[in-house]
Amino acid sequence: MYEIFENLSDEKRNKIIEASLEEFSKKGYERASTNVIVKNAGISKGLLFHYFKSKKNLFIYLFDRIVKEFVDAFYEFIDDSPSDIFERLMNWTIIKFKLYFKKPVEYRFLTVSIYDSPEELKEDILKRYERISSEVMKRFMENLDLSSFRKDIDIDRALSFIMTSIEAIGNKYLEMYKHDIDKLVADKDRIIDDLKDCIDILKHGIYEK
């Protein structure tokens, strides 16, 4: 569907992608202007729609592209993931933060896409997000050592509770910093310390034995 766009020179293609990401990440889908995008990309509006047919297709193309970039980069760092679930959680979370810090505009765009998408895009974005989340979860579960779990608990329920808790913590920070990536970067050490404390509570519990 996007062969004409993909066959552009790297310079021209990247300029359009950068201009689109900047506009969508700052204003969201509905308020983003294709007029601003083409002006900053140095192309005509007719050409933009020749490549993508619609603003929606452009947004979905960017979402798929950026998700793939993040997932591919993420997988490069996890070959030696710890087998302990809590160590792996911390390891993966820190990797995610590092990737976000390297690509702040892309991070803003994904945050807007997932948490602030309009009705016409929600179904498409949700399907893609659920598919990627499922793939990443399968990768996360590979070669986990569950031997330290208590024998009197349901392991599947315990894993579900752990992952839901960590996702809720992550979503809290996404919501808190979704309009201020610079503050997220500035607060990264405090956030990581908070995550470590939360994981420690999940690992050791609250009440004394």
Image (tube, rainbow, N blue to C red):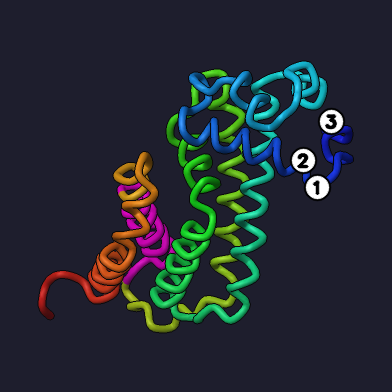
- Asked whether 12 or 201 is in front, the reply is 12
Q: Element type at marker 2?
A: helix
- Asked whether 19 or 120 is in front, the reply is 19
Q: Which mark is residue 10?
A: 1
Q: CA distance from mark 2 to mark 1?
A: 5 Å
Residue at 41 percent of width and 77 percent of height: 87
- Earlier sequence position, callout 2 versus callout 3: 3
Residue matched to label 2: 13
Left or right of residue 108: residue 68: right
Q: Which residues are magenta?
A: 153-172
**Quadrant containing the C terminus in the rendered view:** bottom left
Q: Amino acid at mark 2?
A: Arg
Q: Position of residue 31 (x, y in %)?
A: 49, 20
Badge 1: how crowded within 10 Å, few (<14), some, or many (20+)?
Answer: few
Q: Amino acid at mark 3?
A: Met
Q: Amino acid at mark 1?
A: Asp
Q: Position of residue 148 (x, y in %)?
A: 38, 83
Q: Position of residue 100 (x, y in %)?
A: 49, 57
Q: Position of residue 157 (x, y in %)?
A: 39, 59
Which quarter of the picture shows residue 206?
Answer: bottom left
Residue at 57 percent of width and 27 percent of height: 123
